[in-house]
Image (tube, rainbow, N blue to C red):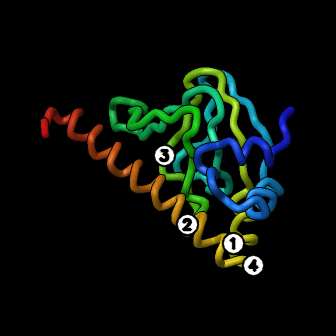
Amino acid sequence: MHDLTEILTGHPFFRDLAAEDVRLIAGCGSNVHYVENDLIFREGEPADRFYLIRHGRVALEIAAPDRGPLAVLTVGPGDVLGWSWLVPPYRMSCDARALEPVRATSFDGACIRRKCEADPRLGYELLKRFAGVIGQRLRATRLQLLDVYGVHV
């Protein structure tokens, strides 16, 4: 098993983050594995974790009345899964389902928040990175909705 610090340093989300910050964050992480069709989290559950996807793909799904789950986005290696741990009310905004075997690094959101409170510089750096993730998800969801409703831009 790789050292978490090494994994984080090589992950695009943490690229160029100061070594001491990577070590602090690694203290809140653990490696996890999911098999195809595993539900990683459910909409409305407490958002107490986020994940760095290292291998495999995960579908972000919403419940569509009379249609069942509707995949709105797929994330894969190099992506971050979950940002709701960062902002109150700390609830997941969708379901996440493994589409194939997934290896990821999971982080305890409360642990990361405590470290960010103790070091506002670290908190600001992570907030900038997660704001980028949130912006990408909003753009991707917008494009998905345009596609679903047959609107071409």
Q: Secondary structure at mark 2?
A: helix
Q: Secondary structure at mark 3?
A: loop
State how far apart marks 3 and 4 are (Cα).
Answer: 30 Å
Q: Amino acid at mark 4?
A: Ala
Proximity of marks 1 and 2: CB atoms separated by less than 8 Å: yes
Q: What's the mark number on residue 94?
A: 3
For the residue carrying disc 1, how many other residues have a C-alpha within 10 Å: few (<14), some (14-19), or many (20+)? some
Q: Amino acid at mark 3?
A: Cys
Q: What's the mark number on residue 127?
A: 2
**Residue 88, image x, y percentages:** 55, 69
In front: 32, or 123?
A: 123
Q: First in sequence: mark 3 or mark 2?
A: 3
Residue for badge 1:
116
Q: First in sequence: mark 1 or mark 3?
A: 3
* Count of all numbered marks drawn on residues in the image: 4
In the rendered view, does 128 fall on the left or right side of 19?
left
For the residue carrying disc 4, how many other residues have a C-alpha within 10 Å: few (<14), some (14-19), or many (20+)? few
For the residue carrying disc 2, how many other residues have a C-alpha within 10 Å: few (<14), some (14-19), or many (20+)? some
Q: First in sequence: mark 3 or mark 4?
A: 3
Q: Amino acid at mark 2?
A: Leu
